[in-house]
Structures are given as structure tokens and as C-alpha cells.
Amino acid sequence: MDNTCIHVVGGLYREECMRPGWREIYGSAGRAASAIAAAGGKACLHGYADTLASDNFLQRAALEQYKVNLTDVADATTFQYVHGLGTPTITTQAASHPSLTISQERVVRFGMLEGDAVVHANFAVYDPQNVSNPRHFAENGSTATHLALVLNRYEAAVLSGIDGSPLEMAQALVSASRAQVVIIKLGPQGALVYADGQEAQVPAFRTDKVWKIGSGDTFVANFAHHWMSGQPAGQAAILASRATAYYCQFRGFATPGQLAAYWPTPVELSARCLKGYRPKVYLAGPFFTLAQLWLVEQAREQLHALGLDVFSPYHDVGHASANDVAAKDLAAIDNCDVLFAIADGLDSGTMYEIGHAQARQKSVVIYCENEADNHLKMMVGAGCIVSKDYVSAIYQTLWTAIEL
């Protein structure tokens, strides 16, 4: 038995994204194996795979130098996204496959849709990855001498059984699961790491671009690699957060040399946001066609989901007289912290709103894919943040707002 190898078990899925274009076969476990191999670790990939997925992983494993131990199934699960922040359409087989059993020194286990994995390990990292019914690590009979849990806030609340602070949830999880380490991901606030009775805060990092699909898998993989190599949990989590930022920026997995040279800026919440303030965002954009309305609805929904207080002229004012619309919209801009503008088409109302926000010295983030650079020259020169990628623009708005 190779005690230095990290055995990764979890979902192996087809992934399709419309914008930006993406058609790959990864899933949580597949991505984690690639991330560990890139980081300089040894990995062995376990999971359920159909013929196409098996061929894909065999070729990738040969190129990236990791091992595979796959269980044949008839068809793979597919995740289809419109964009990286959208809720995916999931196509999967109705029947669940027999559980896999992994007995190894080091194991990373992800929750998955098509089956389960019973793990017996000395060191284990577990990410339940379940948005509706997360399960405890030991619920299926899994055991580990040293266990680390990586959870989002929702999973932590469900599994701890309390609706308290992240620290209170982490302490309850240690008691309930006998975990040595609990990491609770907190979005723009980074993550809480609770290990051996001590808490530490790990920052998130700001990037120019944000490729969201698979970022959580990348964090888990890099944390496991560093923690199982002997790094303290807090330091392993910081390295994992930086590696995740690299992945979001470049859609790739950082090698040790790349990670050593990559120093993104940590996200630092303002004092008022740390006290619970919800920054106000004005959502500017045309809403005269179904496509325009759909995008406004998406932006409003996702900015809300990230914790921002969103004013949308379509939703909060609607169709009214010119005097009424102008007065209410301009007052809302005066009251906002950041203006987020959808600028494709260079709608006259949106351009006016951007100019008014600039005159009031408000921060402005512009999402615009299809206009020539010279059409946005004034906005760029005035200090507006301009992004051609929708998800990146949403995150630039979030980071700008919470740092004010």
C-alpha cells in the first residue's frame, strides 16, 4: 500500500456550460484528482463511470500522472449550466448503484448522486456536497482516525443541528462527528477553520475573472493535499484558498511553482459589513425584451443570493411616467453603494444612470460582452470596472460593495 497516495472518491460527471462555453467530464472527484496531481501529490481516482467517462479519465490520468479505479455504469450524470452561477439542470439515472468501499491511509470523499462510498481511512477529508439533505460522514458506516469536514454554511447548520455562529456550529460538529478539523465556507468572508480547539479565519481572494464551476472541489483537493502532507489545518486552508483563486482566474490547477508565484489580493470586508450591513446595489439595464428581462432577473437573483440589497428599477419602480421613473431611479442611485450595469446595446437610460452614478462618485461595475472597446472608453477612463464575463462582473460587484 502506498501511504502517500490520496484516494479520491465521488461524482464523475459531464459538465456543460453555455456561457462561457464549457464541455468537459470532471465532477468533484475527477477535478480533485487533477488538482492534487498538479499540486505535486499522488492521487488515485474512484467512482462510477460510463464508457466515455472511463476513456476520458484514463487519458487524463496518463497525462497528469494519477491512477484510476473506476466502476462501470451504463450512463454518466450530466450537469448543464446556462452560466456558472445558474442552477444546473441535472440528468442522472434513477437507480442508485451499490456503494463503493475504500479502505486506504488517505481518502477524500465527496457526496454524490449516483451512489455512495463507505470509507475507512487514517486521514479523511469529507465534503457532503448535498444542497437538500447532507449526511454525516459516519452515517453510512465510514470511519477515520483523523477527519476533516469541509462544509458550506447550510450544510454546517443542518449537520450541527444549530442555527448559530460559524464557531458554534463548528464546535457542535466536532462533538457530533469527532472531527479533528471543521472548515465552514463563508463566501466572501472566506472560511472558518476550527482545529484542535482553536479557530482561524482564512480569507477569500479577489480575482479579475471568476470561473465558479468546480471551485469548491479545488479547495477541498488542495486542502487535503497540504493537510495530509503535514501542514497545520489553518495553513493548509490558506494555501487551498489561494489555489482556488488561481483556478477561478485561469480555469486551471496550480502547480507548486505557480502557487508560490501567485499572490492575489485578499477580500477585506469593511467595518460596517462586519457588523452586518448589507451593501446597496443599483441594478441598471434595459428591460424591453424577454432576453433583457431574463438577464435582469438573473442578476437581481444572484446579487441577492450573495447578500446584497438590490434596487431594480423594473421590480421596484416598474412602468410609470417619465418624471416618476426618473425621480425614483435617480434617488435610488444616490442611495446606493455600487451600480451594476448591463451595458450591451448601450441603452440610453443605462448610460445616463452610469453617468449619474459617476457624478455622485459611486462605484460602477459594467457587464458588457458585445460592444467595441472604444464605445466604453469614457467609462473605463472614469474608473468603472468593466467585465465581458457575467459571473466575473457579479463578483466584482460583490467585492467592491463589501469593501466600501
Image (cartoon, rainbow, N blue to C red):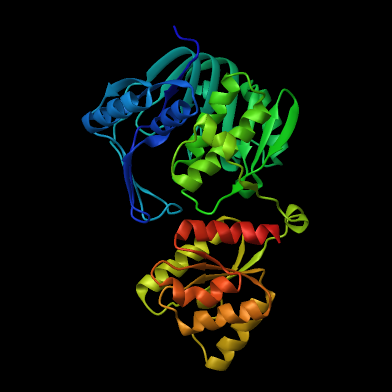
The C terminus sits in image quarter: bottom right
Name the outermost residue toward the top. 1
Q: Nearer the viewer, residue 372 or 4?
A: 372
On screen, residue 119 versus residue 45, left or right, reads right
Q: Estimate the x, y position of residue 163 in percent, counting from the top left.
A: 67, 42
Q: Is residue 46 above or below residue 247?
A: above
Q: Position of residue 70 (x, y in %)?
A: 31, 22
Question: What is the quadrant of residue 401 in the picture?
Answer: bottom right
Give left or right: position of 224 versus 279: left
**360 with respect to 21 (left or right):** right
Q: Image check: 211 left or right of 65?
A: right
Q: Is residue 283 visible?
A: no
- Where residue 25 sits, quadrant-wise, is top left
* Residue visible at 40% across and 55% down in the picture: 83
The residue positioned 47% from the left and 25% from the top of the image is 109
Q: Position of residue 36 (x, y in %)?
A: 47, 27
Vertical relation: 105 (above or below) 30: above
* Quarter of the image where the N terminus is located: top left
Toward the viewer: 202 or 167?
Answer: 202
Q: Is residue 335 above or below residue 325?
A: above
What x and y, as percent, mark residue 400? 63, 60
**Residue 12 visible in the picture:** yes
- How many marks the image carries: the answer is 0
